[in-house]
Amino acid sequence: QVHLVQSGADVKKPGASVKVSCKASGYTFTSYGITWVRQAPGQGPEWMGWINVYNGNTNYAQKFQGRVSMTTDTSTSTAYMELRSLTSDDTALYFCARFVSGFYYYFDFWGQGTLVTVSS
Amino acid sequence: EIVLTQSPGTLSLSTGERATLSCRASQSVRNNYLAWYQQKPGQAPRLVIYGASTRATGIPVRFSGSGSGTDFTLAISRLEPEDFAVYYCQQYDSSPPELTFGGGTKVEMK
């Protein structure tokens, strides 16, 4: 069965960067995209962007352009999301999800989430 | 950017009752680009409906999605205890490629 397992919680100081990993199993990694969604405490989900695992093409939400990078390592079926220049507003639970695109657009399997806390 | 507005913010119902959740878009959304998710505290969202009306794998038949254009609905015909959660709608816009979530509707036990 499909599983996405994310890296553990992280605490960062303002101005620093964070890199979250997402290891996929149970399906052909290059056949689906990976998306990243974050959720601040008590808020709804916020889409950050996605990566086409097959060709490495990315599409970032305007809000995060210039500050986020999404990459993959197909040899280990792992996706990565790096967010730079962190502020306290970036404190949130970060999720990766498998991304179905083409005729439909939706996220069918999700990681367990990684809590990133930004605090001085 | 297409904004999704969900209503009501909270729905207080009892087990066995029908729940009707609304998702209104600021611009027309293609049906195949509209999805619904269920989220329980401390968990990741779970896909419930995609393509506005297709149930995801493993989702019970009491869940149904409908609508088109700017107005979409998620209905739960008879609430079971495990259905009490927050539900989010989500849309994809191709020009430019952007994806947004609604603010959510909490279905709580009365």
Image (cartoon, coloured by chain):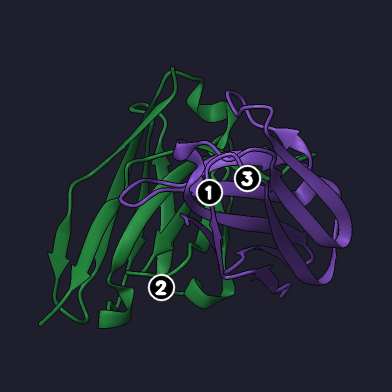
For mark 2, give the secondary structure: loop
Q: Nearer the viewer, mark 2 or mark 3?
A: 3
The image quarter containing residue B16 is top right
- The label on residue B14 is 1
Disc number placed over residue B17 in the picture, else none: 3
Give the residue at mark 2: A67
- In the image, B49 versus B2, the foreground residue is B49
Q: Give the image location of residue B47, x and y in percent.
A: 57, 40
Dots 1, 3 in contact, CB < 8 A: yes
Same chain check for tags 2 and 3: no
Chain hosting mark 2: A
Q: What kind of residue is marked 1?
A: Ser
Residue B76 in view in this figure: yes
* Residue lying at 80% horizontally and 39% vertically, measured from the top left: A103
Q: Residue furthest left?
A: A120
Above or below residue A45? Residue A110 is: above
CA gap between label 1 and label 2 equals 45 Å
Point out residue B64 in the picture as x, y percentages from the top left corner: 74, 39
**Shade of chain A as shown in the rendered figure:** green
Q: Tell me the CA gap for discs 1 and 3.
A: 6 Å
Element at label 1: loop
Which quadrant holds the C terminus of chain A? Answer: bottom left
- The residue positioned 45% from the left and 38% from the top of the image is B81
Number of marks in the rendered image: 3
